[in-house]
Image: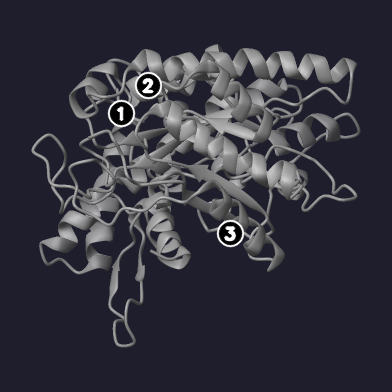
């Protein structure tokens, strides 16, 4: 098998891994080295969902010794198998970099024989890149659970970011669908990376030439929709991972049915893209808005609303918190207002030192007044008063009712529900209802339910 065939197979097998959205590392070019790394993102182009597109995203091997039911690369699945050699992968990366196709490498792998053997091969590929080719660009490497801690340490000294995929949200699901994997084998390297990364930062603060261990930190990935766990369970787990292991990011991956198994959703099941989107919004609230998982979801309401973003849902549930006076409220309270984000909250705090703020000033600052106007006061005056139906209409997420043309061929211009539209819209459209009418019907029903809740 030639290198081009290997690349085609292994790049296709890697598409189910979620790549990082930014590097988290700021490292300028050095004399005698290839490449550099910018903290704001390793490339200058992103896909519409925010994913970085100029990484060489590839598996070292897809010949897996494990038989995880949800994985397209599982041992029992009949598909083409391939593996790089360390030098092949290094030379491929450098070749793409010199052609200006990529600015970094995202490397993962199936378990080739054993976790230790797989890690040794990955480490050798990265060693060739860093030491022989003097590659100074961004590298994100996936750690193989169950590998020796010394191998994890060696990998962390070569890569900018490490990640250990937690895969499924509960130990029970992991035991049922991935019997070769153990929760302890996943969490152990997470703890090691957290400790060694913190120690490395302390060393670098004292001596700038100290070896850097995973300077961009670590992340993990969780599959959503393959198992029955609620959004509340997932967010509680996410919050715990951030607190205990100092993760930079938890990625959610909507389950795409690729194998037939009675324990998994049917092959005709749509990936839960809207649910994935809501979980990312809730994750943002945990990291940047000072919310806790317990505030966003409860035992009585364990799942996120498909028609409202989580912040608007919280606002509807807590009318006693509003209105918020923009000229006196602390930043933490401003962040709870729908339509006010971290940047606009900071600008409000800075601007009100010079003048009293009204609607024109808030608009210039960047506040989304369509939502915020119903939850704030400006010097004691409410800028807008609306009926419950008007307020509910302003809060509903239009993306949940999206219909458009996705041209799959030169003569296919029929409007369809967009992939991230609410499941109810897709269901009505599948029953023969015109997509635009289906979206309108679902929106009217969602609006009615929201008005009743208010």
Q: Position of residue 229 (x, y in %)?
A: 26, 25
- Residue 368 x, y percent position in the rendering: 61, 46
- The foreground one among 454 and 347 is 347
The quadrant the C terminus occupies is: top left
Mark 1: few/some/many CA within 10 Å (<14, 14-19, 20+): many
Residue 424 visible in the current orientation: yes
The residue nearer to you, when weighing 62 against 41, is: 62
Residue position marked by numbered label 3 in the rendering = 92
Front-lying residue, 15 or 132: 132
Q: How many residues crowd mark 2 within 10 Å: few (<14), some (14–19), many (20+)?
A: many
Quarter-of-image position of residue 8: bottom left
Which residue is tagged 2? Answer: 297
Q: CA distance from mark 1 to mark 3?
A: 44 Å
Q: Earlier in the sequence, mark 3 or mark 2?
A: 3
Judging depth in this view, the residue of 410 and 86 nearest the camera is 86
> What SS does tag 1 mark?
loop
């Amino acid at each position: 098998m030639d290198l081009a065939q290997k690349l085609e197979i292994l790049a296709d097998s890697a598409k189910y891994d979620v790549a990082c959205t930014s590097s988290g590392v700021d490292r300028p070019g050095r004399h005698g080295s290839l490449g550099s790394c910018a903290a704001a993102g390793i490339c200058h182009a992103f896909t519409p969902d925010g994913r970085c597109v100029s990484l060489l995203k590839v598996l070292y091997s897809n010949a897996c010794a494990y038989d995880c039911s949800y994985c397209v690369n599982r041992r029992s699945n009949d598909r083409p198998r391939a593996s790089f050699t360390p030098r092949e992968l290094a030379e491929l990366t450098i070749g793409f970099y010199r052609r200006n196709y990529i600015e970094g490498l995202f490397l993962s792998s199936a378990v080739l024989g054993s976790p230790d053997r797989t890690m040794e091969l990955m480490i050798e590929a990265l060693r060739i890149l860093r030491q022989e080719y003097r590659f100074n660009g961004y590298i994100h490497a996936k750690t193989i659970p169950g590998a020796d801690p010394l191998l994890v340490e060696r990998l962390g000294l070569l890569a900018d970011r490490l990640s250990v995929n937690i895969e499924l949200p509960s130990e029970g699901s992991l035991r049922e669908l991935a019997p070769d994997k153990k929760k302890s084998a996943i969490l152990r390297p997470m703890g090691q990376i957290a400790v060694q990364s913190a120690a490395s930062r302390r060393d670098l603060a004292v001596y700038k030439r100290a070896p850097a261990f995973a300077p961009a930190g670590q992340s993990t990935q969780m599959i959503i929709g393959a198992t029955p766990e609620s959004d509340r369970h997932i967010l509680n787990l996410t919050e715990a991972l951030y607190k205990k292991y100092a993760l930079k990011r938890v990625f959610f991956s909507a389950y795409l049915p690729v194998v037939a198994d009675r324990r998994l959703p049917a092959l005709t099941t749509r990936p839960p893209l809207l649910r994935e989107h809501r979980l990312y919004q809730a994750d943002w609230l945990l990291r940047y808005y000072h919310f806790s998982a317990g505030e966003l979801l409860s035992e009585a309401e364990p799942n996120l609303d498909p028609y409202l973003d989580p912040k608007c849902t919280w606002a509807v549930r807590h009318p006693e918190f509003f209105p918020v006076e923009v000229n006196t409220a602390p930043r933490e309270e401003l962040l709870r207002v729908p339509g006010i984000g971290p940047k606009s909250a900071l600008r409000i705090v800075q601007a009100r030192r010079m003048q009293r703020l009204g609607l024109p000033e808030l608009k210039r600052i960047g506040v989304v007044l369509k939502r915020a106007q119903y939850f704030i006061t400006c010097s004691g005056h409410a800028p807008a008063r609306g009926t419950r139906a008007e307020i509910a209409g302003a809060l509903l997420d239009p993306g949940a009712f999206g219909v458009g043309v996705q041209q799959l061929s030169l003569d296919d211009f029929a409007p369809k529900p967009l992939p991230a539209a609410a499941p109810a819209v897709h269901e009505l459209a599948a029953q023969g209802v015109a997509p635009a009418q289906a979206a309108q019907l679902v929106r009217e029903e969602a609006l009615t339910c929201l008005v009743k809740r208010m």
